[in-house]
Image (cartoon, rainbow, N blue to C red):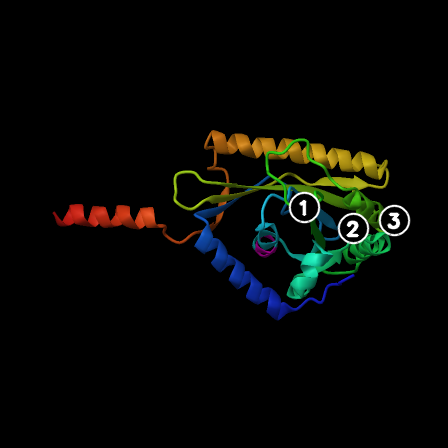
Amino acid sequence: MLKVRRSRLYTLWFGWYSRRQFRRYFNTLRVFMEPGVPEMETGIPVIFYGNHACWWDGFWSQLCTEEFFRQNLHIIIEYEQLSRHRFFTRLGAFSLDRTNARSALQTLDYAAECLTSPSERQNALWIFPQGRIEHIDKRPLFFFNGTAGIVSRVLQKSKAIYLVSVVSRIEYLEEQKPELLLSFRAPLLVTGQDFTSSRDLTSRMQQATECHLDELRVKVMSRSLDGGSVVIQGRESVNRKVERFRKLLGMAG
């Protein structure tokens, strides 16, 4: 497996690059965050889990870490993809190969090791349990059991772990460029007494993500977006430039 080879320089560069890309391709990047997420205890590790609907998912995990948290970011990427883009290991990525059972178990052990390593910062893992990109409105969702396996391993070394549901949605609304919407649910604190089985926890996470996605869809349909924080404001789109030019002509006349 490919392990993390973190580089502060690469992380700074990627933060700059990803913000530049978001400004270029989106009208806004808007974040909805329930109370309790930024206030998590740093001594307790956290897993952010969510739907995997688009290519951009790995980008905004780094952005949110910079914007909202004081954490050591880790993210799991499929071995085939990470082997082609190994620089992501410099940002906190490590690989998962589902075609190799022994390697997959090593990944789960390594993830738990990363989450329980002593640190002044909170240890965080971002994971997309679907394991592949699927349409956002596909139901039911299917989650692999790997995330629950990591939780089980962490609880052997730590008193508790947070689970935070994070979902994303890209929508074209009133602007030429789309809106990227992210939503964080309040953290769920899981202890050894709460953990019953990997299958049960996976089912609970799957259902939570489905409900969370439906809630975000309702927000979009009702245009109830004012509660979100605009983290990135995109560059002015062509339609806005045209409108501004017409206003200038009107003023000149």
State the SS at label 3. loop
Image coordinates of residue 25 in percent, x first then y, are 46, 52
Q: Which residue is mark 1?
A: 132
Q: Earlier in the sequence, mark 3 or mark 2?
A: 2
- Residue 214 drawn above or below residue 88: above
Q: Nearer the viewer, mark 3 or mark 2?
A: 2
Q: Residue at x 80, y 52 (%)?
A: 99
Residue at 66 percent across and 69 percent down: it is 7
Left or right: 46, with 248 as reference point: right
Residue bounds of the magenta highlight: 62-66
Magenta segment's dominant SS is helix
Residue extending farthest left: 253
Residue 223's image quarter? top left
Expressed as whole percent of the image width and height from the top left, the position of residue 17 reads 52, 62
Q: Where residue 48 appears, x then y in whole percent?
A: 68, 46
Mark 2, residue position: 98
Tag 2 secondary structure:
loop
Q: CA distance from mark 3 to mark 2?
A: 24 Å
Say which label, 1 or 3, has the lower sequence index: 1
236 vs 169, left or right, is left
